[in-house]
Image: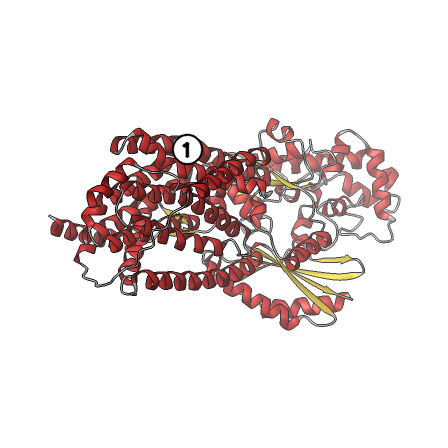
Amino acid sequence: MKKFLRILYIVVFVIAGVFAFTHPVKTETNILRAVFSNSMEDETIVQLSGRYSSKINVLIEADNPETASEKALEFYNAVDKNSFEITDFNISQILEKYKTYSKNLLSLQTALKLEKHKYNEVTGEAFARLYDPMGFMLMPLDEDPFMLFTDYVKSFGKGNPDEFIFNDKYYKIISLEVKNDTALSPELMNGKVKKLTEIQSNISDSSTKIYLTGAPVHSFYASSKSMMEINIICILSSLFVILLCYFYFKSLKLLLPIGISLGLGMLSGYIAASIIFQSIHVLTFVFSTTLIGICVDYSLHYFIEKDLSKILKSLTVSMITTVSAFGILFFSGVELLKQISIFTMTGLFSVYLIVVLFYPLLKFEYTPRRLNFSLSANTKKIIAFIVIFVSFAGIFFLKFNDDIRNMYVPSKTLLSAEKLFADVTGSNKKVSFAVIQGRNIEEMLEKEEQIARCLSDIKFQALSKFIPSEKQQKKNFELRKTLYKNSLKTYAAFLTAKQINNLLNEKDLPGFLKFEKNSPFSDFLIGENTSVMVLYNFDNPEIITQNGGRYVDVQKDISEKIKDCRIACVKMLAPVFILLFLLLSSIYTPRTAGKILTPSILASAFSIGLLSITGQPVNLFHILAIFLIIGFGLDYSVFRAGGVKYSSDAVLLSCATSVFSFLLLAFTSFKLISSLGFILSAGLTVSYITSLLFSYPEAAASAKGDE
């Protein structure tokens, strides 16, 4: 029978593997995709959040404008144009086209004044523009005597968008957009950003400083440092496992089957997840492969006892309870939890089958040491008091923080560069969005204009500001004609009678300024006939919603979504423990089931309490870590309850390897990883120690039988 099962396992594994690797899925690295669904509303938030996630800003600082321009050109020439698109928004390049339709174009403020017949006010502003010594003229006065086209262009914003003066320094900005092929590969992206840092270093000198800002720059520095730290941790963890195995088993032969089973378990989890899901999130690998570390425990139990029949029940119970606990996550409604569920269940079951079906074929000779670690009665009382005290004390300090920005703390250098960029460009305002959708571009623009009229003194940017709807262009043309009729003769003393008559007798529209696909303003579109208005320091969302738009505060909406996921995870804990209690009660007794579950409950409560007491706010990823603690804790308690003679040694070795690895993670520079390492190392330690506080009748009976 076992031979048939071995062949069946291999056949299923190979067929599934071939299918998975011939139909590869994308690895998702956007952390928001872990909690956001594919619904239109969620997709909009992710899209708006990612609008600038592939942009790199190059800020050149110099003592004079000539040097700034020269260095900017030198940097531009050194950039790999195959990997980056250079954003070159220069208003002078589009003015010629706009001049053709100048009679259709009015700034919003001027249009509103003309609608209210405030001709004197508009005329006064025209005189101010006309006699402004620092002003400029875009159209001849005989074509635009009130300089309304100049007023319209000035409403776009002040000055050249890539040149600034700040604190007596001259700045030039180059905006780089990472191309899709590069953006989809984190490794390739980091390589390109590294090239930019080399260009930055080569061009910078005593007269010029160059700063790099943007999400890809942060990702490069964070991942570079994290990869180095994780590589060191992997080396230290591997050495620790090797030394521990050699110390206990006096042999290194066992490392090969342990490594193979662990690798096949992770591969099985990946294959199952890739068959079911269109993409696999990188956090799925982080959490799931961590939990599959329980598989090391399965191997240790087998090699310590050398008799499958003695550990089969405990091994099976551990697998069933852990798989059942994570099976509930599939019904959570959170994409990340669904993926973790499938990955973990498949991986654990696969390793279980490897241990049961293939390990008995191995013929290794070794003589393990015996540890027989235990605690005195007084030590147990002290540990119980500390665990319970920390768990309850933490309640009074418990606080949550769902702001995703708190999970990553950049270096002081990057923070300074981001602050300087915000100060120079004036982009340190609160930014929110209005999402506008229409049946066509024209209707969309009209909706934007309707909202724009309600924004009063609020600063904003929108597609309709640069390309008005045809309806508004017609209206602007008529408003201009009305202004001429009421004020031109008294205002334009500098024009001849013929020029005035020509202006008064204009009848036909020059056509309409229309949106084109290659428009420099296409970034305002986020979908078919869907645009975004960018709002600055805006706090009245009712204006947007009452006029048919959708208000989006990206930072707030992301925090709310993460909060919802955190609450969903917390709500899953009770069903998980209830299911586990019922399962264990059916296998043992309700009393024993309670004893098996208690260490996991205490470890979870202690971990959250310890976070609270040390002043660390609890977030979604800490709650996810609780599920890992449950998985490991169950494994420790189930094997102790099984009463196998030397199971305590296997549990101790398994705990030692896991805690050592997680403790090293606690010292990494990436806040998310370090906080997970902290809570997991503490939780697993408490889970193991509290499992020593209980005695199990089944274990005693089994031990007596062995004797």
Q: Position of residue 665 (x, y in %)?
A: 49, 55
- Secondary structure category for the residue under label 1: helix
Count of marks overlaid on the render: 1
Q: Amino acid at mark 1?
A: Met
Q: Taking 325 as reference, is 368 above or below it? A: below
Q: Is residue 540 left or right of residue 251?
A: right
Q: Position of residue 636 (x, y in %)?
A: 35, 44
Residue 538 placement: quadrant? top right
Q: Determine if residue 256 is in view.
A: yes
Q: Is residue 652 left or right of residue 140?
A: left
Circle 1 sits on which residue?
A: 572
Q: Determine if residue 436 is in view.
A: no
Q: Is residue 161 left or right of residue 78?
A: right
Q: Is residue 316 left or right of residue 114?
A: left
Name the foreground residue: 225 vs 578: 578
Name the foreground residue: 2 vs 376: 376
Q: Position of residue 466 (x, y in %)?
A: 65, 45
Q: Residue at x 31, y 54 (%)?
A: 267
Q: Residues within 10 Å of mark 1 (few under 14, many from 20)?
A: some
Residue 338 placement: quadrant? top left
Name the foreground residue: 90 vs 80: 80
Q: What's the image's color scheme?
A: secondary structure
Name the foreground residue: 33 vs 482: 33
Q: Taking 555 as reference, is 293 above or below it? A: below
Q: Position of residue 266 (x, y in %)?
A: 32, 53
Residue 690 placement: quadrant? top left
